[in-house]
Amino acid sequence: MNSTNTLVCCQFLRFYRFCEGLKTLGVLEKIQKYPDRFRPLFCYEPSALTADQLDDLFTIHLSSEGSNKRVAEEVVIPFWRDYLQDAEEEGPSKLQKILAFATGASVVPPIGFSPSPSVEFIHKGDDDFSSTPLFPMANTCINCIKLPLHVSYQLFKEKFDFALGNTYGFGRA
């Protein structure tokens, strides 16, 4: 028997044992009788993302209260939320691109993310930036998006759109 046949045989045996286990309490018969009711338990179908879901998914990490950094960050938080709302109006693919930019995944996995997605801010002097960074950055390994500190929504949106349109793949975008 060649390796392909062995692999098929092993997979079949696993599936057969699984079905036998389901038969034990009559579960298999119920699955066969009501397949549409059991489909969500066995087949993950991601729902369309919304701006609110994406906003809730990300934890925002702010600097110490009362600091100048915190003041600048609090200006950008509404820009982030407005951007998500605008993206939702453009269609589900834009929200998927934002999620993929930050996490590497365009849909939320059935068991969620680990670590949980987060939002941080890029300050002048962080990561060896001598000037204020213009574009958002992401680290898909830790599901983190870092937002630049812009003072206008139009500039924030323009730079975020550019970043989304010009970065593909994993790693640091």
Image (spheres, rainbow, N blue to C red):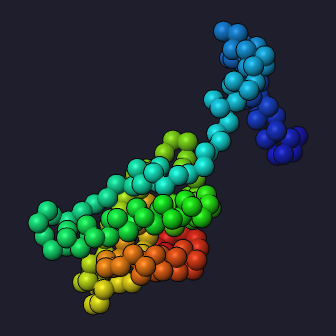
Image coords of residue 129 (percent x, y)? 30, 86
Which of the 4 quarters of the picture holds residue 62?
A: bottom left
Q: What is the residue that sits farthest to the right in this orientation?
A: 1
**Vertical comparison of 107 with 69: above or below:** above
Q: Can residue 160 be seen?
A: yes
Which of the 4 quarters of the picture holds residue 39?
A: top right
Q: What is the residue that sits farthest to the bottom in this orientation?
A: 130
Viewed as shown, does residue 71 lie left or right of 109? Answer: left
Q: What is the residue that sits farthest to the top in this orientation?
A: 25
Q: What residue is at 24 percent from the left and 84 percent from the top? A: 125
Closer to the camera in the image, 160 or 115: 160
Image coords of residue 22 (percent x, y)? 69, 17
Q: What residue is at 82 percent from the left and 46 percent from the top? A: 3
Closer to the camera in the image, 21 or 129: 129
Viewed as shown, does residue 155 lie left or right of 73? Answer: right
**Vertical comparison of 129 with 85: above or below:** below
**Vertical comparison of 126 with 144: above or below:** below
Viewed as shown, does residue 168 lie left or right of 14? Answer: left
Image coords of residue 34 (percent x, y)? 75, 19
Closer to the camera in the image, 137 or 88: 88
Q: What residue is at 69 percent from the left and 14 percent from the top? A: 27
Q: What residue is at 53 percent from the left and 52 percent from the top? A: 50
Q: Can residue 163 be seen?
A: no
